Image (tube, coloured by chain):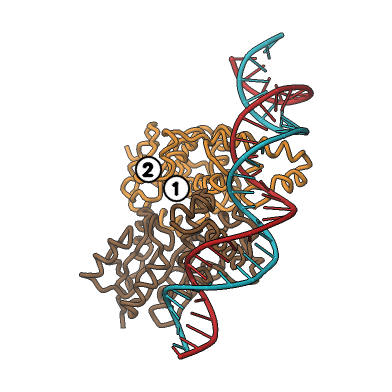
Chain colours: A orange, B brown, C cyan, D red
Amino acid sequence: MKENYKVIIVDDHQLFADGMVRILADEDDFEVIGICNNSTELYHMLNNHKPDLIMLDIQMGGTNGLELCCDLKKTMPQIKVILISMFESINVVNEGKNSGANGYIPKTTDAALVKKSIREVMEGRDIFVKPINSETKVDLEGGSYAFLLSKREREIILYIKKGFTSKATAEELNISQFTVDTHRKNILKKLKLNSLKELISYAYENNL
Amino acid sequence: MKENYKVIIVDDHQLFADGMVRILADEDDFEVIGICNNSTELYHMLNNHKPDLIMLDIQMGGTNGLELCCDLKKTMPQIKVILISMFESINVVNEGKNSGANGYIPKTTDAALVKKSIREVMEGRDIFVKPINSETKVDLEGGSYAFLLSKREREIILYIKKGFTSKATAEELNISQFTVDTHRKNILKKLKLNSLKELISYAYENNL
DNA sequence: ATAACAATACCAAGTTTTAGGTATTTTTAT
DNA sequence: ATAAAAATACCTAAAACTTGGTATTGTTAT
């Protein structure tokens, strides 16, 4: 009873994807049918190919892997998705679960564990590999609060990261400066942070 | 005349390293003699093994690959070093050159280019692969200014990233708040930035 | 429908940052 | 030795952020 799982790898790091192909090529129950460097390529490929599994990098320039995962799961729920991330944060793992993925693997894990994880997922068991060194933000009581953020709040964060003042952001969005201030206040409260500076670091470490 | 280059791969992403081994295993003029996940492991391995080339990831949790490269080049200049990085910024490339490395490859390049780069470097020609999408900070007139930063200034940046106020930082370092303010001012000037918020984003995007 | 959430807007006091300086001591490199 | 760079310290005024509120209007999910 030889299974032959069709896999698509989505990662903007071509080199990583190339390596992954070779790791999976060791085994004869997997078959990599495609490599994509972004969501556009993936959607294009999905028109012609139906994979059993998508290995999806969360961090891709310009593309949010988590949103992509949500979207995939809405339209093609039968396709399994395993998220791959260079981040070790427990927050990212939780966000991964919320996005509907079937698994999460940090890039610090090794080839053997990847193969094992794929087989687990293909047999119907979701697997979320626990980060080893979750030194970042363990004080968040084991939970990510980022999922609490609204769309507008995420938008505000982008301006904060770019160094916009609340006044400048308000002008850009054509709303009152007071409104921007309120959004900022709510963001800090939701994420349990104390300043915009902490927020920016948090945003980079948690891929916001 | 079959060469056989001994290679050590240093990357805290085991999965990436595993993939790289398989990429290099395709060819018979390379031989991976070791994989290290951090600088400690590397130094330990160098006691017993003399590689011709070290493939060194710049971003490793807790370890600065650039500093490691400087150090390696001081004590063992005969060993070639190729830096690998997930960052596309031209700044990082320039810092790589300053650290004495023989080459730089972003993770967005593919397996073929890696092999080519290794052969180039082993034949004595340094190779720095130009970033494709250097969308970040292209306004810096083609140059990284990060190398201008002093040790103390880099230290101050770490506190800024953690959200410390200048007062808190001053207490931590047992210096005057005015001094911290001066350092901050000088950092912003050197990097041509306008606020601490921009600095934090810059720091994350440029691995400071 | 109705409760919860999202997005909007306002006020005020206190803290921090920003931008313009000047200036001394210590360290580093030629 | 000596010039350059690094690290230190101080001052001020304006701008921005922080924190504590309150409050109205949409939108969404049960």
Secondary structure under tag 1 reads loop
Count of labels in the image: 2
In the rendered image, which residue does mark 2 sit on? A131
Q: What residue lies at 38% left-to-right and 54% top-to-bottom?
A: B13
**Residue A171: percent from left, percent from top:** 77, 46
Q: Residue at x 47, y 59 (%)?
A: B175
Task: Report whether mark 1 lies on the same chain as mark 2.
Answer: yes
**Is B5 on the left-hand or right-hand side of A47?**
left
- The residues tagged by marks 1 and 2 sit, at their Cα atoms, a distance apart of 8 Å
State the residue in front, B133 or D12: D12
Vertical side of A144 occupied by D3: above or below: below
Instruction: Examine the rendered structure and indicate whether residue A61 appears above or below residue A185.
Output: below
Please say if the residues under marks 1 and 2 sit with CB atoms less than 8 Å apart. Answer: yes
**Residue behind mark 1:** A87
Kindly identify which numbered label has been placed on residue A45.
Answer: none
Disc 2 on helix, strand or loop?
loop
Q: On what subunit does the disc labeled 1 rest?
A: A
Q: Residue at x 48, y 35 (%)?
A: A144
Q: Nearer the viewer, residue B81 or A180?
A: A180
